Amino acid sequence: MGLTFLLFQVAVALFAIASYYIYRNLSYFKRRNIPHETPHWLHGNLKGLRSTHNFHDIFGAYYNKFKTLQVPFVGLFVHQKPAVFVTDLELVKHVLIKDFSNFSDKGLYYNEKDDPISAHLFTLDGPQWRLLRNKMSSTFTSGKMKLMFPTVVSVANEFIAVMHEKSQKNSVLEIRDLMGRFTVDVIGTCAFGIECNSLRDENAEFLQYGKLTLVEKRHGNLIIAFMESFPKLARRLRLARTAKRVEEFYTRIVKQTVAIREKQNIKRNDFMDLLIELKNKKNSNPDNNEGLTMEEVIAQAFVFFIAGFETSSSTMGFALYELAKNPHIQDKLRAEVEEVFEKHNQQFTYECMKDLKYLTQVMFETLRLYTIVPHLNRQALKRYEVPGHPNFIIEAGQSVIIPAAAIHRDPKLYPDPEEFRPERFSPEESANRESVAWLPFGDGPRNCIGLRFGQMQARIGLALLIKNFKFSTCPETPDPLVFNPKSFALGMTSGINLKVEAI
């Protein structure tokens, strides 16, 4: 009886401590008189996430609810963790650019010891990120893009041949999947030097693992939430985020590719060549900070593949969807493409890229309307008082969320935001907007390092598609599009069917 009563008292005490801890967390913004929505005790302000709503839905609704308050930020609870939700472009500019030194970290979970593939440029923080960014910057210069350009064009020409074959058999094609196959072959070639052949083989290994990586998790939502909320404790518990078979696949592929290239002295002027150079610098001098370990090579190749595959394929798919719905825009774009090709003697050269100005506007408007990554994460290194707002304090270690997708649909910044209008990104209209009003690649020193490559492969693919085919809607075309609530990026529950006619 005595032991039972003691255990009961211990349980009551633990429950009281846990309840107080939760109450203190969830009353954080109330005590500071910061506007916020009353949180759920477990889910915070993310109730329904990955079941009925995605991040785009939840953050879009939150932004629209509070954007008129004329405050720099409002409170948001990521489960039980209080975070800063930015609603003012001036604060966006401070976080990303002006005061970047205090917001250089993202605060995302990675575990380089037990899950080394997770420790890549997108997730790393602190001195590790700075050092790796400096090492990798030289691999994404315009000069390096020019070297990779012929490889991308070669894959794109094969893509056009496949499209001709498929459109002759069936005029209605699911273009979202086809765009994914194209980008898998491009990234597979440039990042791994492997002919993936996913354009002709829907069961190609690289294609299957590319799709798998975006949906398969090592743990359920509860454990993922724990890792995000308590990263230090999660690392001590040796929790990994990357699915085991995904980690094993990319580790095997990178090691095999490196071994073959070094043994046969193969040079392809691609991303893998550059990673191998950095690895050899490290091998020749382990104390050389300019080199990369094999684990770092695997992690960078992995994130390059995933980021380039999903963002570019989605952008191309959504662009074709809007061009099919807006034939006058498609005709205008086709006229520009034909003019540029004629100017360059029907040769697709690297110099063509800068002449495809309207194509760039189409891409930028697509990324505004269909922002693939819904928000940007940052974390304060030190306590920060928002300039001009002394009552709004961002504490050291606190997460900062910038709702990029919601900002892109703000009617004050983009009138009639649901309308697809590439002219928004003409030099004249762009000059009248803050640069941080468009954030598909982030901004400041921690913007997307691969944006040049991503834009290059999307431009090449779209230019050749519009030159060779006419796209239009059909009864099978979804309207409106339905997005997958389980996907972090802007993913579809089904494909995009369009009528495709060779020109």
Image: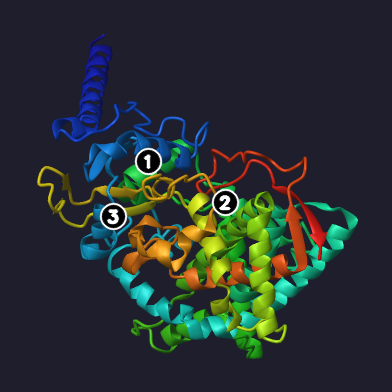
Earlier sequence position, callout 1 versus callout 3: 3
The amino acid marked with disc number 1 is: Phe
Vertical comparison of 232 with 357: above or below? above
Tag 1 and tag 3, C-beta contact below 8 Å: no
The quadrant of the rendering that contains the N terminus is top left
The quadrant of the rendering that contains the C terminus is bottom right
Rendered residue at 31%/44% (across/down): 230
The residue pinned by badge 1 equals 226
The amino acid marked with disc number 2 is: Leu
Please give the count of numbered marks on the rendered protein.
3
The amino acid marked with disc number 3 is: Val
Looking at the image, the residue that sits furthest to the left is 390
Q: Nearer the viewer, mark 3 or mark 2?
A: 3
Tag 1 and tag 2, C-beta contact below 8 Å: no
Earlier sequence position, callout 1 versus callout 2: 2
The residue pinned by badge 3 equals 92
On the question of residue 345 being in view, the answer is yes
Earlier sequence position, callout 3 versus callout 2: 3
Q: Nearer the viewer, residue 53 or 109?
A: 53
Q: Nearer the viewer, residue 378 or 327?
A: 327
The residue tagged with tag 2: helix, strand or loop? helix
Tag 3 and tag 2, C-beta contact below 8 Å: no
Could you say which disc has been placed on residue 214 in the image?
Answer: 2
Vertical comparison of 452 with 269: above or below? above
Vertical comparison of 170 with 292: above or below? above
The residue tagged with tag 1: helix, strand or loop? helix
* Cα separation between marks 1 and 3: 27 Å
Q: Nearer the viewer, mark 1 or mark 2?
A: 2
Rendered residue at 68%/42% (across/down): 494
* Cα separation between marks 1 and 2: 20 Å
